[in-house]
Image: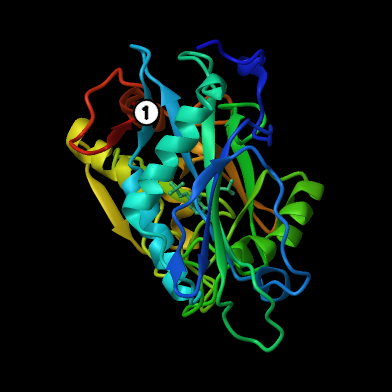
Amino acid sequence: MEKKNIDWSNLGFGYIQTDYRYVSNFKDGAWDEGCVTTDANVVISECAGVLQYAQTIFEGLKAYTTEDGRIVTFRPDLNAQRMIDSAKRLEMPAFPEDRFIDAVDKVVRSNAAFVPPYGSGATLYLRPYMFGSNPVIGVKPATEYQFRMFATPVGPYFKGGVKPLTIRVSDFDRAAPNGTGHIKAGLNYAMSLHAIVDAHNQGFDENMYLDAKTRTKVEETGGANFLFVTKDGKVVTPKSSSILPSITRRSLLYVAEKYLGLEVEEREVYLEELSDFAECGLCGTAAVISPVGKIVDHGKEICLPAGMTQMGPVTQKLYDTLTGIQMGRIEAPEGWIHEIK
Ligand code: PLP
Ligand code: COI
């Protein structure tokens, strides 16, 4: 199979239309059998639930070319499960896990020419999503839904690759204590748009959101969870019921403990203890692990000792081990790698 003529090494995190995507519709209480289509456009009612009341959820995962030339995805079962959790919270029908994995297989296989080559630094990002498609005018859930999954080749989420980021403590809240922060709903991202545009205008790469109730504890950024490393090498990550349960973060904690022999701790992390940490990183499918060099809290600068030129040593080890597992250089724990055949 001949690869597309794309400058893989210079890709950013953007949308490039690929040849195929998967579609399935939910109507009269059941999902249809679904199919792969070349049609990249969605035509829905002007009154569709998603357009009126933002009834939409999504996921993000990647396909990788391994060192020995296979195409694999990383823990897609966890994305399927999280999408089911998101659907329940927004009163949407679950798209079953086996159907989700089948859609992943079909979208990646049919777009194999878009899967970036091993060593290019790029990957094929998959975006599963679901939305209420029938007319809804009173505030209530839709009765018809569409599940779709498209693929787009991507490079690093943050411009500059592994150059440490500068982030600011946000005055805006991301999620309410009993709200929707723990699911992957479009509404969580809509409300972050003003905060991210404002952060960029002020020269920051991202926002650090605090817990909305006390504004003393670290939650996450708009698109990634936090990982911190203490000065004595312990990996610490915030525990909160209003952050997205990142699959990357869960995987990294396992890698830290089982592969690197590090102590790990999932606990509440207070804003006032940030200056005690040696390293900080943002972790997620898109972000992988992006190092943070500086956190600015209303003019007060917290400079991580790892500095602004490269990843800290523990962050680097975590990054190398995780990407080694994803690209087939390091043996993966049972069930983590799903090969596309
Ligand atoms: N937090 C938010 C708000 C996200 O959008 C994402 C991206 O999916 C993550 C964390 C990281 O999650 P994952 O590692 O499952 O991609
Ligand atoms: C992902 O990492 O897959 C995400 O969905 C984050 C998004 C903000 C791009």
- Position of 332 with respect to 204 (left or right) is left
Residue 31 at x, y = what percent?
Answer: 45, 63
Question: On screen, 204 above or below 210?
Answer: above
Query: Relative to residue 238, is residue 119 depicted above or below?
Result: above
At x 64% / y 68%, what residue is drawn? 133
Please state the horizontal and vertical placement of residue 317, each as a whole percent of the image. 34, 27
Task: Judge by depth and name the residue closer to the eye, 272 or 245.
Answer: 245
Quick one: SS at disc 1? Answer: strand
Q: Which residue is drawn at 40% across and 27% down?
A: 316
Task: Please give left or right for residue 80 compared with residue 2 in the image.
Answer: left
Q: How crowded is mark 1: few (under 14 residues within 10 Å), some or many (20 or more)?
A: many
**Residue at coordinates 34% horizontally, 23% vertically from top-left?**
324
Please name the colour scheme applied to the rendered image. rainbow
Determine the residue positioned at 64% across, 37% down.
38
The answer to whether residue 235 of the structure is visible from this angle is no
Quadrant hosting residue 54: bottom right
Q: Position of residue 318 (x, y in %)?
A: 35, 32
Asked if ligand 1 lies within 8 A of label 1, the reply is no
Q: Within the image, what quadrant is residue 169 found in?
A: bottom right
Q: Which amino acid does label 1 sit on?
A: Val
Which residue has dot 1 on it?
72
Q: Nearer the viewer, residue 75 or 216?
A: 75
Eyeballing the image, is 154 above or below 116?
A: below
Work out which residue is located at the far bottom of the displayed protein and give it.
Answer: 138
Q: In which quarter of the image is the C terminus?
A: top left
| Number of numbered discs | 1
Residue 103 location in percent, x, y?
A: 44, 44
Does residue 20 appear in this view?
A: yes
